[in-house]
Image (cartoon, rainbow, N blue to C red):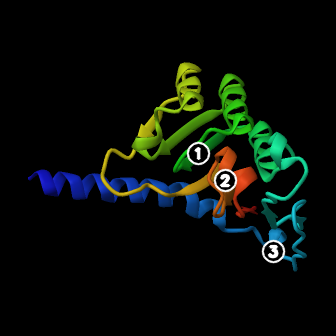
Amino acid sequence: MKTENYARSQYMIILMVLMLVLPSCVPSPSDMPTPIQVTSNAGAETGFLEIYFTDPTSPHAADFEGGPDETLAAAIDQAHLSVDIAAYSLNLWSIRDALIHAFKRGVVVRMVMESDNMDIDEIQQILDAGINIIGDQREGLMHNKFVVIDHSEVWTGSMNYTLNGAYEDNNNLIRVR
């Protein structure tokens, strides 16, 4: 019975994630992809697809400035309806602040993350602001890293939403509209 309930809850989590992500992945005919030009740090903006790379060698990396997290935070700041986020870990102030500001503006903010990483100060500040965070509550890593904004764009890639992920490691962040 316990195994059956566990399997059912896992199925429901997967189904909910698919319901959130899949509609955001289907472009309208006017949003068909165009060729992209990938640039190192700034990202390639084409409307349908944008790709950003972290740059640990940037002079601003030591100051934790100028990374792709700032572009993601700006997108969250533009949210009107909802921000759904799955994160292995989060300690970027830019993302924390954007989520809190969105929530205070009345945007629905939902978050799921690795339970082992929920004791971080920034996570406690998000919780203190009133945003509910659901931990994965299981063994094995919940290593997802994606954000769905207003059911119309998905941010994903190898970058964890952490200082290390955005400023000290080589990662990518991809925006799909």
Q: Secondary structure at mark 3?
A: loop
Q: Which mark is residue 32?
A: 3
Q: Which residue is mark 1?
A: 84
Between residue 56 and residue 153, name the one nearer to us.
56
Q: Nearer the viewer, mark 1 or mark 3?
A: 1
Q: Is residue 114 above or below residue 37?
A: above
Residue drawn at point x = 54 percent, y = 54 percent: 20
- Residue 126 place in picture, x, y as percent: 58, 27
User: Which residue in the rendered view is the most extreme toward the left?
Assistant: 1
Question: Label 2: few (<14), some or many (≥20) within 10 Å?
Answer: many
Residue drawn at point x = 44 percent, y = 47 percent: 114
Question: Label 1: few (<14), some or many (≥20) within 10 Å?
Answer: many
User: Which residue in the rendered view is the most extreme toward the bottom?
Assistant: 35
Q: Secondary structure at mark 2?
A: helix
Q: Marks 3 and 1: in contact by CB < 8 Å?
A: no
Give the spatial CA distance, label 2 vs label 1: 20 Å
Residue type pointed to by label 2: Gly
Q: Which mark is residue 165?
A: 2
- Residue 2 place in picture, x, y as percent: 12, 51
- Residue 69 place in picture, x, y as percent: 76, 47
